[in-house]
Amino acid sequence: MMRRLFNTNFNQGSLHFAVLILRVSFAVFMMVHGYQKLQTLIAGGEIQFGDPIGVGPYASLVLAVFAEFVCSILLLIGLGTRLAVIPLIITMVVAVFIVHGADGFDKKEMALHYLVAYVFLLISGSGKYSVDHLISKSSNRRRR
């Protein structure tokens, strides 16, 4: 039992399942934030949204909705995962270093958690349980 607890070998099946859980959970969590922003965007009227990178409140809101909602949907299904996490990484970097730059760690912590997960997914990819894997498998068959 102890040997199994301290085993450092990777179980590929478990690793792919863990990536699936990470990918889906962080996508759903971020979609909640993005959906709220999408509702603000759709509602029309005057946009009351921060402009942390100096592109204007409307453009900032559109970029946030794209990253937090659209890219999260792509992340959820595992389609273009490495590309989809790039806007999410940028959004979290802006949140940590610009929006909450002067705040304490407690205000930055959540964005840092997202940032670490997104960087992991950028490196690891979407895993076996994803549309990316199906596309990759299909294109590999065609090359033979």
Image (cartoon, rainbow, N blue to C red):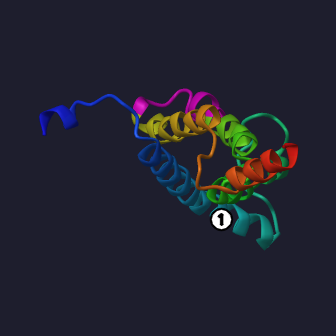
Q: Residue at x 62, y 46 (%)?
A: 126
Which quadrant, please, contains the N terminus?
A: top left
Of residue 126 and residue 56, the one placed in the foreground of this image is 126
Image coordinates of residue 84 in percent, x first then y, are: 73, 46
Is residue 138 left or right of 75 when viewed as pictured? right
- Total number of numbered discs in the rendering: 1
Image coordinates of residue 111 in percent, x first then y, are: 52, 39
Q: Tell me the kind of residue under disc 1.
A: Tyr
Furthest residue in direction front, as rendered: 144
The magenta stretch spans residue 3: no
Q: Secondary structure at mark 1?
A: helix
Say few, some or many: other residues with alpha carbon within 10 Å of mark 1 (under 14 / 14 to 19 / 20 or more). Answer: some
Magenta-tinted stretch: 93-105
Is 36 placed above or below 50 here? below
Q: Residue at x 78, y 59 (%)?
A: 47
Furthest residue in direction bottom, as rendered: 43
Residue of label 1: 35
Image coordinates of residue 121 in percent, x first then y, are: 59, 39
In this rendering, does residue 143 appear at all? yes
Is 50 placed above or below 124 here? below
Which quadrant, please, contains the C terminus?
A: top right
Q: Residue at x 65, y 53 (%)?
A: 75
Q: Residue at x 71, y 45 (%)?
A: 50
Is 48 placed above or below 55 here? below
